[in-house]
Image (spheres, rainbow, N blue to C red):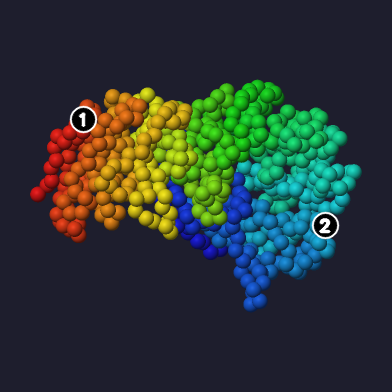
Amino acid sequence: MRTRIAALLLLLPQLALAGGLRLVAELPDVRYTNAAKVSAQRFVLVGVTWERDAKNRPIMPHYELFDFQERKVIDVPVPLHQLPKTHTDTLGRTNPSATVVHHDGQVTSLTFNATQGYSAVATYFCQYDHRTKRFSDLVLLGPWNNTQYVEDIGFDPADTYFYYASAVNPAGNVLKGGYTSFELARINLETRAIDWTMKVDFPKRDKPIKLVSGPKKFSPDGTKLALVEYNDKGNERQHPARPQQQVLVIDIPSKQVDSYPAPLTTYGTAFTPNNRYLLLGSNELGDVIRIDLEKKKIDAKTKGMKKVHHFVVTPSGRSFLVVSNTQQISPKVIEVRRVSDLSLQTSIPMRMLFPGNDGVAMEVMAGLNGRMLMTPFVDEKGWSSKKGVRLYEVPDDVDSPEVAGSAGGDLKIAQGVVLGKQYADKQGLRYVDYRVDPTATFEQFVVAPDGDVLLIGTLSGNTDGDYKPGRTKPVVARLDPAGKPRWSKVLVKKGFLDYEGGTVAATPDGGCVAQIASYVHPGRHPVTRLVKLDAKGKVLWDHHFRGDGGARTPLGDHFSLLPDGSVLITGRYYDDVNDKQRHDWKAVLDPNGQVVSDEVSP
């Protein structure tokens, strides 16, 4: 197998993101198309490319698997064009399509559908050993006909077995009409022996309902399997499910089945690491329930966010992440709940995980026993991109209400930043999307001591292809703790033609000081300018330092609010128009906007 190491950017620990999830790598070159886990802890199928013959016909797939352990993409070629003739004869075609269902680093497991004409007639299992470069014999998993077809279940957490089922409906039309029972079975991934089978009857109804799509969930010890029936509001109106949709928990060693009522659209499903509880979450309703598998009853319920897509249990089993589609709901966060009582512990702002975007249909793959999460980059609309992934390290537990904001800080700061950015986006205010330093006093988005959010941005009539001077206006705004605007102030000033960027600081008297990059001429440096506003948005003073952006104009680079409300400014000063003769510059403005000091180094 060829190995392709993805471009790997390791980030420093201080760049930890919210809720204890630490961003450990960004892999911009990893493709992400039709991703699927192909082992319990290690490998994720992220793409496939094809070798082609002289006539440009595809002959051999190269499966691209991301390896959580090595943090790289490996290239796994499987020479389907070299399948033995006995195999292609059985499968009914010389170029059969394969589905990768498992990979262990040395052996790739595949399923094939045998066909007659354009119809599937059976499903077979086969393995390719990359050490010997040989295909195994075909193993028949089951036939396809009017009353049954084969459906993948998935592999157990120990990567010992691959489970599958024949979906059966004796009345016929099983593909469209639905199934009434599963004939479950498993194949040993080492010996290819089918060593366990059992029949599972689903509740009898006038109209059968199917299971939630995708791989099914196993308990961490591999002894239990959860089959969750799918139902939604629309189906319930047209064909009420009686009895209501269920989750069937199968004890694999004893072949015992326990059934419990399940919420509508149960997309969140997870067993706890101690195998004691099963957690379920509703996409449409936001209902979260906990099933005690020892006492065999639903023992806890709560109402959470809607549009649930995934549950991710932390390695300790004390908390779990509720990943929802924040394109469609607010707040734009990932909930962190306690397993003990389902209570909300904290929330992780989505913008802290996806810079510049809080409305995200987040996809997530977990590996290494839940200690590593992979999620793809997203586009401006929050949909998964076809290229680029991030890796997050999951702590043993998220047991504090504090989260890391962008680079540190608490939940109050993180949520304030999110509220400020949501307001700015809605108003069309431009800002620079960089990581917030919670130790800084001047920032684009600041949470005041009373919980209000202060922000600064720029209104602009310019576009990338259409720029003219004089189309920009600086704006400072104040929001209440819920994100509702208290006031906003446009701070243009005579003598300045353009504005860009800026920062703001909350002052001890309840007001704020805004630092505004103000240009006399757009081709020069900005003039250093500060504006003081009171708690109601009234301008108390407006001071700009000497110069017009050319030579001998002091340029402020760093602004700090001192305890008494004064502002310390440090920056640069150039004697010449070519910026070659640099000096350090330092100045202090008192709380009334008066210059206390203004010093240029020799």
Mark 1 residue type? Asn
Above-or-below relation of 15 to 289: below
Residue 435 vs residue 507: left or right?
right
Q: Amino acid at mark 2?
A: Val
Q: In front here: 501 or 404? A: 501
Left or right of 308 on screen, residue 387: left
Q: Foreground residue, 279 or 128? A: 279
Q: Position of residue 526 (x, y in %)?
A: 26, 49
Q: In this view, which residue lies farthest toward the right?
A: 171
Residue 90 appears anywhere in the view: no
Element class at badge 1: loop
Provide the residue designation for mark 1: 592
Q: Can you say whether 1 is above or below 426 in the image?
A: below
What residue is shown at x 70% (from left), y 33% (from top)?
264
Q: Nearer the viewer, mark 2 or mark 1?
A: 1
Which of the two residues, 288 or 397, is positioned nearer the viewer here?
Answer: 288
Horizontally, residue 498 falls left or right of residue 146, namely left
Total marks placed: 2
Question: Residue 117: which quarter of the image?
Answer: bottom right
Rendered location of residue 572, percent (x, y): 19, 48
Residue at which label 2 appears: 121
